[in-house]
Amino acid sequence: MAEISRRTVLTATGAGAVGALAAPAAGAAPAPPSSRRHRTHHPRPVPEPLKVPEAIGSGGAVSSVDPYASEVGIQVLRSGGNAVDAAIAMAATLGVTEPYSCGLGGGGFLVYHQTRTGRTWTINGRETAPASFTDTSLTDGAGNALPFDATVSSGLSVGVPGTPLTWEVAARQFGRRSLRQLLRPAEELARRGFVVDAYYRSHTESNEERFRRFPETARVYLPGGRVPDVGDTMRNPDLADTYALIRRHGVGELYRGRVARAIVDEVRNPTTAPGVDVYRGQLTMRDLERYRTPVQAPTRVRYRDHDVRGMDVPSSGGIAVGQILLLMRAYEERTGRRVRDLPEADYYHWFSEASATAFADRNRYVGDVPDVPVDELLSAGYARERALLFDPQRAMARPVPFGSPDGDYDDAPGAGGRQGQPTQGQSTTHLNVVDRWGDVVSYTLTIEQTGGSGITVPGYGYLLNNELTDFDFVPLTPGVPDPNLPGPGKRPRSSMSPTVVLRDGRPEVTAGTPGGATIITSVAQILLGYLDRDLDLVDAIAAPRLSSRNAAEGADLGLATSPVGVELTARGHRLSPQRWIGNASGVAVEGRSLVAAAETVRGDGGAARVVRGRRGHGRH
Ligand code: GLU
């Protein structure tokens, strides 16, 4: 059972606070618990390491939203682990400290670039629908979409989790350490406890009512019946035991063994508070047994001198980010102007138009179906044709129609129909690692909405995803094929965009972020800021974001009301102010320096670390 205790002995500490959680040398015995006992007879919680948005140095670098995770990652690198090892240990740690964004009950996409061979692999750890799903599984008997919110908090939204198998496959195929070693820091943190910060508290608070619908979730995440305060210690011994179970027996327990049984039983028949009724799910033991995490080739786009590698289907991330970049190039050709020289208002205008165009195509063509025209969507010829719609002065009418990626690109824009917008959540987390060999991992993982389905696997301490709500419940536009309808064993389309950029065959920058469909626009904007607009990575991440998704355009950090926002509005953009869009992080390789970067403000700031720190920062 999760427990909570008041902070009594904590003091502020700097980096290195979770040094005791470092991955052990091969075969080392588990470290003994802290000798000084907490007054309530618990082991002492692990003090929160510092949040630092930028770190410059060498020997390896990591970044994430969370200082515990980044600290664990850097310890793995220090002790000789590679980028994949660090990424797994960080992800497991995030499962403890960011349990509403990711964890064993969710899925994700891991991009791994190996510098020695020049090869990039991606692991498709997306959740899958049950074999019993059809294209009407998310409708009522009369063909109407089920209510979205009721579907989210129910067994029906839960797909087969992909994260545990992603870790096992990644460690086995690409790591230097065993999963057994890599899960140890996270297990210890879950047992000893971490210090609750404002971010964690606010996410718990916003989920409180929902969590109370599921008594097991309330037991684990509202310990003592309440939302933990900032400064409290949050422990999750159930999750610690689950990590211990995986360390002993592997992830098979979660796909075939007793944990799998607990998942299936709970999804099919959720235990709810008195008076609460939720949809039942359809997952079976067979669905879990048959689950696989394909290792796939990345999407690849040539953007100037840069080789941009991202996540292919079932994510739309690599395709849409690539298309935005290609459209910006096509606008350059049409106007004779350069992205790097554009005044801010022009830059945001171009970016908004490119994003809206890419989203129109994504919604029409991209999903977990066999015939996605990836090469055509990512061709310069198609971008040129799509750029014919672009007006340098005025925003195109929304929704922008989708195009025809048919290989014939010499004349008219070839506009197809206009479509509505799918619904997506706003959770998830992202991490980056570059190791001493120059290998890179960019990994985005999620349980979909903050708090996922709200259902905790009874006795095992982690939340199950609601990823199946990423399907379109009904066709977006009647009469237009929709590649993202539910189907048997199908994976819902994602926006997650873990990205690695190479130049002259060497890693140049990696980045990613949470944020549902805004992930695509945030990652594209960070890449443009860094690669074209000459911003340092931390500034490219900190820059105000515009997220144009072929409908309303979100704008954060005061952009909507700034002079640039006013000019955009005059050009026909309809900006809707948001507090924060995304929570990004990345690592840049600049000569012999590694620059780890994270948010300065969004999400209360992120956590960048390097193995060996260095002063001074000369770009390029
Ligand atoms: N489920 C979303 C996706 O795969 C991510 C959720 C989020 O970032 O909020 O695109």
Image (cartoon, rainbow, N blue to C red):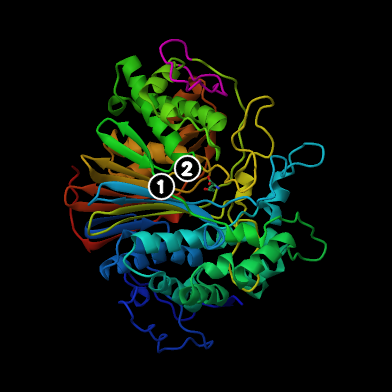
Q: Is residue 323 left or right of residue 259?
A: left
Please say whether residue 557 is visible from this viewpoint. no
Q: Which residue sits at x=26%, y=52%?
A: 595
Query: Quick check: marks 1 and 2 in contact, CB under 8 Å?
Result: yes
State which quarter of the image contains the N terminus: bottom right
- Nearest the viewer among 427 and 84 is 84
Q: What is the three-letter code of the residue carrying label 2?
A: Ile
Q: Percent position (x, y) of residue 442?
A: 37, 51
On the image, which quarter does residue 330 sit in?
top left
Q: Give me the C-alpha separation between circle 1 and circle 2.
A: 8 Å
Q: Which residue sits at x=72%, y=60%?
A: 268
The secondary structure that dominates the magenta segment is loop
Crowding at label 2, few (<14), some or many (≥20) Cα neighbours within 10 Å? many
Q: Which residue sits at x=55%, y=56%?
A: 291
Q: Is residue 142 above or below residue 100?
A: above
- Nearest the viewer among 289 and 271 is 289
Q: Percent position (x, y) of residue 374?
A: 45, 32
On the image, which quarter does residue 478 sit in?
top right
Q: Is 533 in the magenta?
A: no
Please say whether residue 349 is visible from this viewpoint. yes
Would the CB of label 2 be found within 8 Å of ligand 1? yes
Q: Secondary structure at mark 1?
A: strand
Q: Which residue is mark 1?
A: 512
Q: Which residue is mark 2?
A: 519
Q: Percent position (x, y) of residue 270?
A: 73, 63
Q: Is residue 572 above or below residue 475?
A: above
Q: Which residue sits at x=71%, y=55%?
A: 282
Q: What is the three-letter code of the residue carrying label 1?
A: Gly
Q: Is residue 30 above or below residue 363?
A: below
Q: Secondary structure at mark 2?
A: helix
Which span of residues is magenta-colored?
394-413
